Image: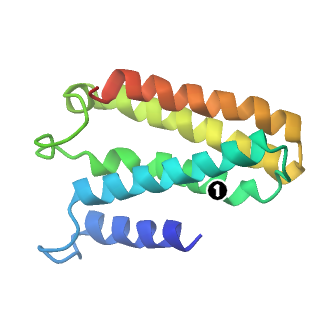
Amino acid sequence: MRKVLLLGAVALLATTGLARADGPSPIEIRQTGLDLMSGDFAGIRAVVAAKGDVKPLESAAKAMQRWAAIMPAFFPAGTEAGSKAKAEIWTDMDGFKKAAAKLGEAAGKLAELAKAGDADGVAAQVKEVGAACGACHNAYKAK
């Protein structure tokens, strides 16, 4: 939860121009956010594989949903160099935003299923979240 609040605060500062000029770059923010999301998703998958209690997974899924909603903002023009992202992110920003929204929707549904304690639903939705991640990676991440 704290990591999401921290990312949100950094995002707010970065997008409102209040961040110091030598503060975190959009590249650093997006790499950190993607790493955190990856860790959350790995933890969710581990609980599902172990057939553990899915209710505590709600917060991690919500964090993924919130990150997906703000992630495109951290791919502004001029941040292409040295990125693992394909040029298509910047040439097809609308498509990238749609892919991020699809991930956010899938993660939101995962959070709802986790909150309800629906282990079978969570297991099925993990596959949907993975498919949304994979579709975005296939279209927008360099190999």
Figure label count? 1
Q: Secondary structure at mark 1?
A: helix
Q: Is residue 130 left or right of residue 51?
A: left
Residue at 56% across / 50% down in the picture? 64
Residue at 82% across / 51% down in the picture? 54
Quick check: 30 above or below 139? below
Q: Is residue 21 left or right of residue 29?
A: left
Quadrant, the N terminus: bottom right
Quick check: 9 above or below 114? below
Q: Residues within 10 Å of mark 1 (few under 14, many from 20)?
A: many
Inspect the image, locate mark 1, and give the three-letter code of the amino acid beneath it: Ala
Residue at 76% across / 39% down in the picture? 49
Residue 55, picture quadrant: bottom right
Q: Report the front residue among 5 and 94.
A: 5
Residue 38, percent from left and from top: 50, 47
The residue singled out by tag 1 in the image is 60
Residue 120, picture quadrant: top right
Quadrant, the C terminus: top left
Residue 19, percent from left and from top: 22, 75
Display coloring: rainbow
Residue at 72% across / 42% down in the picture? 110
Residue 98, picture quadrant: top left
Quick check: 12 above or below 112? below
Residue 142, percent from left and from top: 26, 28
Quick check: 86 above or below 75? above
Taking the view exactly as shown, the residue that stands out farthest to the front is 50
Q: Is residue 94 left or right of residue 87?
A: right
